[in-house]
Image (cartoon, helix red, strand yellow):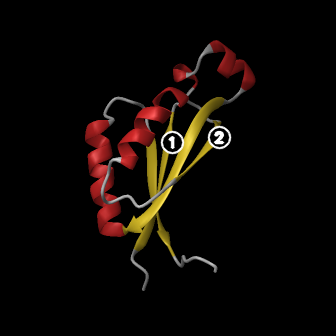
Amino acid sequence: MNDTCLINLVVSPEAESAVTDWLLAQGSVSGFSSHPIAGHGSSEHSMTLAEQVAGKRRQVLFQLHMPCDAARGLIDQVKTRFAGSGMHYWLQPVLESGHLG
């Protein structure tokens, strides 16, 4: 069985550079992707008036995959380093991954 996990981190655009720099400095991270996304949800209390009117909030999604034990360790570090940032995360099992030559 594959013991690889996909880490998903959703951060504010203001935190994008700090998260990018931090991830690049981590020895356990061999690479990652980042994507601009629109967040939709019921957390209107944390949205600006313009975001409430638009019904969405600009955010950035970081994705990286690694062995699950390393992923859990990285999430523990994220919780410490970015405490109070409002970051949302989740881990998913990866059934298969590879590179096509």
At a point 55% along the width and 45% down the height, the residue shown is: 61
Depicted 31 relative to depicted 47: above or below? below
Residue 29, given in percent of the width and then of the height, sits at 38, 58
Give the residue at x 54% y 76%. 97
Q: Tell me the kind of residue under disc 1.
A: Val
Q: Is residue 15 left or right of residue 76?
A: right
Residue 58 percent across, percent down from the top left: 63, 31
Outermost residue, bottom side: 1
The residue at the point 55 percent across, 77 percent down is 98
Q: Quadrant of the N terminus?
A: bottom left
Q: Which mark is residue 1?
A: none
Q: Please identify the quarter of the rendering in which residue 96 is found.
A: bottom right
The amino acid beneath tag 2 is Ile
Q: In the picture shown, does residue 38 fall above or below 101?
A: above
Judging by the rendered image, the residue that carries numbered circle 2 is 37
Question: Which element carries disc 2, helix, strand or loop?
Answer: strand
Badge 1 crowding class, 10 Å Cα cut-off, few under 14, some 14 to 19, many 20 or more, is many
Q: Position of residue 38 (x, y in %)?
A: 66, 37
- Quadrant where the image shows the C terminus: bottom right
**Residue 43 placement: quadrant:** top right
Furthest-right residue in this view = 54
- Check disc 1 and report the residue beneath it: 10
Q: The residue tagged with tag 1: helix, strand or loop?
A: strand
